[in-house]
Amino acid sequence: MHQITKSNNLFEEAQKYIPGGVNSPVRAFKAVGGNPIFIKKAKGAFIFDEDGNEYIELINSWGPMILGHANSKIEEAVQKAISGSLSFGAPTAIEIEMAKTICEMVPSIEKVRMVNSGTEATMSAIRLARGYTGRSKVIKFEGCYHGHGDSFLIAAGSGAITLGEPNSPGVTKGTAQDTVTVPFNDVNKVHEAVRANKENVAAIIVEPVAGNMGCVLPAEGFLEGLREICNAEGIVLIFDEVMTGFRLSPSGAQGVFDVQPDITTLGKIIGGGMPVGAYGGKREIMDFVSPVGPVYQAGTLSGNPVAMAAGLAMLSQIKEDQTLYSDLALITAKLENGLQEGLDNLGLPYTINRIGSMISVFFTSEKVSNFEDAKKSDLNLFGQYFREMLKRGVYLPPSQFESWFISKSITPNLVDRIVEASNESLRVIHQ
């Protein structure tokens, strides 16, 4: 049994000075129970808490640590960059190298603007789409998360063609009226929403593979259907690839499904773990961004030299490793098979969704293809499962509605340990 005395003490202290004791809500363990673990360091497939406990880690900073923690080449690049100062707020050569690398790896991106987070990228992409089209409304999908920008914190109305309602205090009804929320994987509802807001929809934004309702794959023809609608109606199609970009293939989910958006938002991996984001797309759209165009967006730390160095070191390794994605898919499939066998042996209801190195276990026997399906999962059971796995040294995302991310550091032996921990955890829960 792990002792977490220091973590408990730190959480008590943190709550005095930080809202909820955390700087991002999911870290508070509200969805799974118990107190959060405070992390001191990480290496490869493992993280270590303040009490010295070791965990096999399946969050990987919500995706970017695809090569494992404390990658030596990334650390070397960061140390070299730091020696030249931490920030300039002025142009640097490494920004060009980063932009060129992204454009080479993602064919739909002809120009790219660096920012500091995925939220900043999606907020900027929406503003750009509105400026480019001269339209005001945005269509998003229930359960897809695009950061905490006001336009995205909108709950669905009573029907697919109704306007949204704010689902966070501080978001105005005026903002909500410009956002229409429809079910993920339902092209027909998108058609309805577009017809109801004829010639007033600037953008459709979507996670091509959802990661924030758990891992949920696009149905056959869904992404293609969105592309066709946008082509026909002059709507900007935005793929939010903050999670999937360079995670599912060298060109992200769009490379897997062969559907090209007009704008792509990126984050996570392109910083190698440093705070960073980007949005990019067609040249004629990106040239609407200031200073060449009228759509304003700026940031003192955008293109930060340390973040650029870390990101380039990450992308360089991804480009060089010809078997990275096939290896990740194989090891994640091994994990999927092991988890399935244990769940089947206990006769538990479950659904596992997986693509590449993204995977989720839902405690429901029904297929999960949208947020309503995901909400049918047994959340209490997941909370118990999370806590039992933590006791056995496996650190899962502390929410049913978050994808697991597998890194290159997860070996077949570690998969066996994860599966063994899963089987033991489930047996304890169902004694």
Image (spheres, rainbow, N blue to C red):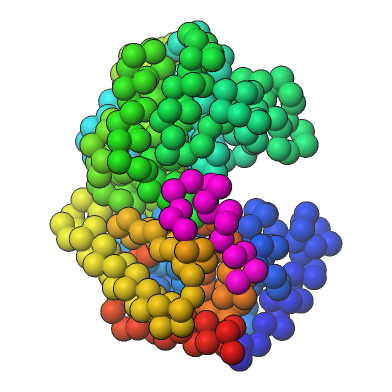
Of the pair 112 and 367, the residue shown nearer to us: 367
Across and down, in percent, residue 402 comes to 52, 57
Across and down, in percent, residue 408 comes to 31, 67
Q: Going by the picture, which residue comes out furthest to the left?
A: 322
**The C terminus is located in which quarter?**
bottom right
379 left or right of 360 in image: right
**In the depicted structure, whether residue 385 falls above or below residue 208:** below
Residue 49 visible in the snapshot:
no
Of the pair 214 and 28, the residue shown nearer to us: 214
- For image coordinates 63% across by 83% down, the residue present is 51
- For image coordinates 58% across by 69% down, the residue present is 382
Residue 158 visible in the snapshot:
yes
126 left or right of 22 in image: left
Across and down, in percent, residue 327 comes to 22, 65
**In the depicted structure, whether residue 378 falls above or below residue 205:** below
> Is residue 370 within the magenta segment?
yes
**In the depicted structure, whether residue 56 falls above or below residue 276:** below
Residue segment shown in magenta: 366-381
**The N terminus is located in which quarter?**
bottom right
- For image coordinates 76% across by 64% down, the residue present is 14
16 left or right of 218 in image: right
> Is residue 334 within the magenta segment?
no
